[in-house]
């Protein structure tokens, strides 16, 4: 079960990162605070794709623990999301 949850999350993370890599507009925090570029988003998409593959392998071979993989990916996706979502709150310095 955790493998498939991780797989779905990683596929969604890949899709969002690819969408952001192709997007022309960037938020203030994304561009000027965290220095995220299209290349940064593409790298996260590749990382998410690798995790999706790991989750698929974990679903087929239960000896590969899915919960630690999910924990690692959860931290990565939270950090990635914080890099451009923070600007949505409208905080001004």
Image (cartoon, rainbow, N blue to C red):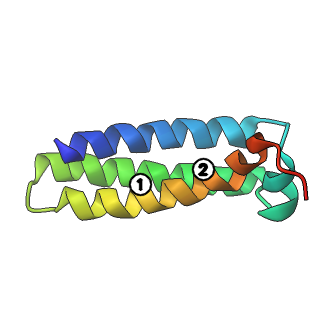
**Real-space Cα distance between discs 2 and 1?**
18 Å
Q: Which residue is mark 2?
A: 81
Secondary structure of residue under mark 1:
helix
Residue 50 lies in what quarter of the image?
Answer: bottom left
Q: Is residue 81 above or below residue 18?
A: below
Q: Quadrant of the C terminus?
A: bottom right
Residue neighbourhood size for the residue with mark 2, other residues' Cα within 10 Å, grouped as few (<14), some (14–19), many (≥20): some
Q: Position of residue 91 (x, y in %)?
A: 83, 50
The crowding category of the residue bearing disc 1, from other C-alpha atoms within 10 Å (few below 14, some 14 to 19, many at least 20), is: some
17 to the left or right of 70: right
Q: Quadrant of the N terminus?
A: top left
Label 2: which secondary element: helix
Question: Total label count?
Answer: 2
N-terminal label among 2 and 1: 1
**Residue 28 relative to residue 81: left or right:** right
Tell me if residue 52 comes above or below residue 23 in the rendering: below
Q: For residue 54, what is the image quadrant?
A: bottom left
Dots 2 and 1: beta carbons under 8 Å? Answer: no
Tell me the residue at 68%/56% (across/down).
83
Q: Position of residue 29 (x, y in %)?
A: 81, 54
Residue 76 x/y as whole percent = 49, 60
Q: Residue at x 22, y 46 (%)?
A: 3
Q: Which residue is mark 1?
A: 50
The numbered mark at residue 65 is none
Residue at x-position 87% and y-position 50%: 28
Image side of residue 58 versus residue 88, left or right: left
Task: Looking at the picture, tell me which residue is in the foreground, 87 or 47.
Answer: 87
Query: Could you tell me which residue is drawn at 69 percent across and 57 percent down?
Result: 40
Q: Position of residue 63 (x, y in %)?
A: 8, 62
């Amino acid at each position: 079960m955790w493998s498939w949850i991780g797989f779905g999350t990683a596929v969604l993370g890949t899709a969002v990162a690819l969408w952001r890599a192709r997007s022309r507009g960037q938020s203030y925090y994304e561009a000027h605070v965290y220095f995220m570029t299209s290349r940064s988003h593409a790298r996260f998409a590749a990382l998410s794709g690798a995790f999706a593959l790991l989750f698929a392998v974990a679903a087929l071979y239960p000896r590969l623990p899915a919960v630690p993989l999910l924990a690692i990916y959860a931290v990565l996706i939270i950090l990635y999301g914080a890099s451009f979502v923070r600007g949505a709150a409208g905080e001004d310095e």
